[in-house]
């Protein structure tokens, strides 16, 4: 339970207006950027890159990668840090999973990140839509690595199970901030609930998934609180951690209390690794999906996941697994 009540407010005068020199955004200068943008427009897809105003979208699109946001562009929650608009969502689009799959095929992706807005208007929170999208992507690209970045589904186990039954390689759910600041930063979300979702997701597939979470810095968190968050994530079986600088999307969003230096991000990375995280991305412009394919946290469980997927399709047996035919009686006598 957080010690901070739901009415907590942050003083807007805390905002640090001038960004430091290390907060720099690269503008597009690569033809692949425009090709990616054109494809996304053509298939009528939504990306978190644009909706969340990610500072790395120029770089990622220039490399021909994108994080697809399914289930619409209107969120049912109003988190104090997030640029995605809050409104009554539209109905789910039945052909969206196929469109996402087609995008991954055209882009020749080997790693895809699929995320979504919170859909508290749906009984399953959009879990079935995640499941259908994962299946469609895997059907179109059998060798692709599938990472999902999901909401908490209001901690409904049966909804979470739907996502895990589709067998993503990497399961990501962001803690976003320290426990004390959670009621201020995250609308309707709960610190302990997020930890529980991460642990349950891994248990539902007998540990055969890489689990990942992210934290924003610069919202007024203390160092001891950050280290406590590290310990809490590790205690809930999370092995991949991302840390980045919170940047204020508009004047209506939470203020930036502090710009964390690159050296501090480097130091926190070393501490996190020493504590037991296997992979850590830490830097001012790091976001959940930034260079997601570079870590390869799924390697430890890849063979097990693929075996389970083949088994589910009835393809688990190869020639080496087939029983040897019983030897003919005449052959036995000849050998004897």
Image (cartoon, helix red, strand yellow):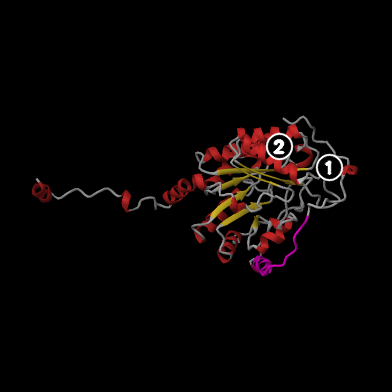
Magenta segment includes 172: no
Residue on which the image places disc 1: 257
Q: Which mark is residue 321?
A: none
Label 2 to label 1, Cα distance in Å? 22 Å
Residue 132 position within the rendered picture, expressed as x and y whole percent measured from the top left: 56, 54
**Quadrant where the C terminus lies?**
top left
Query: Which callout, 2 or 1, points to the residue nearer the camera?
Result: 1
The residue at the point 71 percent across, 47 percent down is 283
Residue with the mark numbered 2: 190
235 left or right of 16 in image: left
Q: What is the crowding at mark 1: few (fewer than 14 residues within 10 Å), some, or many (at least 20)?
A: many
Q: Residue at x 51, y 61 (%)?
A: 140
- Percent x, y for residue 231? 65, 33
Give the quadrant of the N terminus.
top right
Q: Is residue 305 visible?
A: yes
When the figure is inspected, residue 103 is found, relative to residue 124, above or below; the finding is: below
Please state which of residues 152 and 250 is positioned toward the viewer in this rendering.
250
Q: Secondary structure at mark 2?
A: loop
Instruction: Tell whether position 35 is magenta.
Output: yes
| Count of numbered circles on the image | 2
Residue 88 versus residue 329: which sits nearer the camera? 329
Q: Secondary structure at mark 1?
A: loop
Marks 2 & 1, CB-CB < 8 Å contact:
no
- Could one spot residue 46 in this view of the protein? no
Q: Which residues are magenta?
A: 24-41
Horizontal and vertical percent position of residue 44: 66, 65
Circle 2 crowding by C-alpha within 10 Å: few under 14, some 14–19, many from 20: some
């Amino acid at each position: 339970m957080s010690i901070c009540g739901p009415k907590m407010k942050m003083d807007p005068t805390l905002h640090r207006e001038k960004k430091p020199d290390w907060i720099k955004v690269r503008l597009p200068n690569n033809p692949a950027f425009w090709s990616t943008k054109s494809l996304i427009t053509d298939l009528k897809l939504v990306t978190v890159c644009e909706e969340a105003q990610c500072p790395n979208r120029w770089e990622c699109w220039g490399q021909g990668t994108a994080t697809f946001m399914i289930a619409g562009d209107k969120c049912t929650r109003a988190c104090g840090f997030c640029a995605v608009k809050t409104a009554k969502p539209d109905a789910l689009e039945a052909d969206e999973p196929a469109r996402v799959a087609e995008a991954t095929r055209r882009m020749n992706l080997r790693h895809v990140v699929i995320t979504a807005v919170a859909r508290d208007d749906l009984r399953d929170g959009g879990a079935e839509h995640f499941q259908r999208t994962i299946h469609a992507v895997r059907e179109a690209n059998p060798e692709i690595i599938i990472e999902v970045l999901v909401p908490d589904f209001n901690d409904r186990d049966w909804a979470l199970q739907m996502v895990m039954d589709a067998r993503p390689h990497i399961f990501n759910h962001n803690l976003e901030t320290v426990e004390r600041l959670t009621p201020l930063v995250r609308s309707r979300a709960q610190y302990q609930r997020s930890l529980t979702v991460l642990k349950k997701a891994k248990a539902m597939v007998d540990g055969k998934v890489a689990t990942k979470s992210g934290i924003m810095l610069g919202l007024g968190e203390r160092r001891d609180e950050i280290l406590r968050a590290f310990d809490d994530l590790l205690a809930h079986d999370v092995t991949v951690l991302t840390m980045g600088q919170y940047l204020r999307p508009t004047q209506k969003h939470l203020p930036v209390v502090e710009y964390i230096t690159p050296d501090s991000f480097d130091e926190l990375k070393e501490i996190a690794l020493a504590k037991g995280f296997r992979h850590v991305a830490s830097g001012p412009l790091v976001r959940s999906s930034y260079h997601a394919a570079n870590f390869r946290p799924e390697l430890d469980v890849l063979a097990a996941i693929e075996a389970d997927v083949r088994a589910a399709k009835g393809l688990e047996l190869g020639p080496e697994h087939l029983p040897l035919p019983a030897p003919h009686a005449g052959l036995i006598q000849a050998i004897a």
